[in-house]
Image: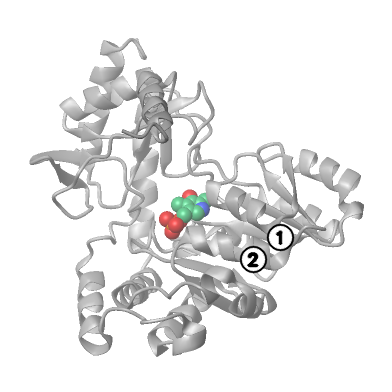
Amino acid sequence: MSEKLKWIENELQSLKDAGLYNRIRTLGSPQGAWLVVDGRRVLNFCSNNYLGLANHPRLVKAAQAAVDQYGVGPAAVRTIAGTMDLHVALEQRMAAFKGVPSAITLQSGFTANLATLPALVGKDDAIFSDELNHASIIDSSRLSGAQIIRYAHADPDDLERKLSEQRAAFPRAVVVTDGVFSMDGDIAPLDKIFEIAQKYEAILMVDDAHGEGVLGRGGRGIVDHFGLHGKVDVEVGTMSKAFGVVGGVVAGNPLVVEWLRQRGRPFLFSSAMTVPDVAACLAALDILEESTELVDRLWKNANYFKTAMKGLGFDTGSSVTPITPIMLGEAPLAQQFSRELFEQDVFAMAIGFPTVPRGKARIRVMISAAHDQADLDKGLEAFARVGKKLGVIA
Ligand SMILES: *Cc1c(COP(=O)(O)O)cnc(C)c1O
């Protein structure tokens, strides 16, 4: 047998040895507060289904109706085969929801980021990037060829220092940050970052994947949370989290959106969101615009759970959102904790390097509006039992 792929076997083994090997659970049910995993009912603390929309009857019905009318797929890229009125409607509705002039949809949040930075900056330019930004921002930055200048996490002073030292060397610059940081649940100080980006004439881009449907009035996102409408040039978002579907969006300045229609490579060279996805997203917008009930319940649940976890003695890090990290340190401990929780019918994944820095492994609990009081209490009991057993809490 050829030896040319032997290195992969070795690498996989070292991942297993380090407790960093991903074992993916297979679900036999929709995403909801409870899941069926290997025939067993477990409480779901893993998904980004913040509002319980992934299996919401109105989204399901909208998707079914759209498939009856339009079929399933878009059949080619939009610049060549034309674009469905459904996609145009979603873009108009997303822009209106976020209170900005324009929006463009892409296949996912990841490709929305990949489309954006290379369209805005090139090899002579610079990207000032929070050191904990999402992998899709990092990859998009590299793809652009621009010089990447990292600033300390959520630190406007360090951003200003770097801009004052280096901004003048580049014709164009982008300041880019996650809105909500997905592994810690803290929020970028976007109001301060805006002031600084403005002062140094840098384009401001925020990735609001975990803010969409969560932050701001009725889930209108981080720009709404800070009241920065019309000030943030580029707002990337996803319909794969709180919206419960899949899809990406870039909203904000109409020039940027128009430019992405001309020069966004994942827009030009990859087909659009599918018909049922778009229809389900439109139904999600209907629900969000009708009432803040789901968003309110999400926050109530998150505050209840987080307060109780702190009361038990767990370290929930710097989270101020429904993302609740339980800081454990070493990856093998986090993996063991996750396995023990699963034995108690609680599904909460361990997260280690490279998703978070080495030595900062954790269990990440994702609270949802789909959870009820009994679910949260059941989860708390399981955490208390396993935490004591493993000596994490007294
Ligand atoms: C999840 C996430 C993405 C990717 O979104 P998808 O729609 O799943 O591709 C991008 N950026 C951030 C910050 C995310 O958390």
Q: Which of the two labelled residues, at mark 1 and mark 2, occupies the earlier sequence position?
A: 1
Identify which amino acid the numbered label 2 is placed on: Val
- What residue sits right under mark 2 in the picture? 234
Helix, strand or loop status at disc 1:
strand
Q: Which mark is residue 204?
A: 1
The relative height of residue 216 versus residue 291 in the rendered view (above or below) is: above
Identify which amino acid the numbered label 1 is placed on: Leu
Residue 298 percent location from the top left of the image: 35, 51
Crowd around label 1: few <14 · some 14–19 · many ≥20 (10 Å): many
Rendered-image quadrant of the C terminus: top left
Residue 290 percent location from the top left of the image: 36, 73
For residue 23, which quarter of the picture?
top left
The relative height of residue 220 versus residue 300 in the rendered view (above or below) is: below
**Who's the residue at 66% across and 38% down the image?**
153
The answer to whether residue 330 is left or right of residue 52 is: right
**Ligand 1 near label 1 (Cβ, under 8 Å)?**
no
For residue 384, which quarter of the picture?
top left
Residue 55: in sight, yes or no? yes
Q: In 3D space, how far apart are the residues under numbered discs 1 and 2 (Cα atoms)?
A: 6 Å
For residue 286, which quarter of the picture?
bottom left
385 and 338: which is toward the camera: 338
Q: Residue furthest toward the front? A: 1
The relative height of residue 304 versus residue 57 in the rendered view (above or below) is: above
96 and 44: which is toward the camera: 44
Residue 221 percent location from the top left of the image: 52, 60
The answer to whether residue 242 is left or right of residue 139 is: left
Residue 228: in sight, yes or no? no
The relative height of residue 42 versus residue 219 in the rendered view (above or below) is: above
The answer to whether residue 327 is left or right of residue 281 is: right
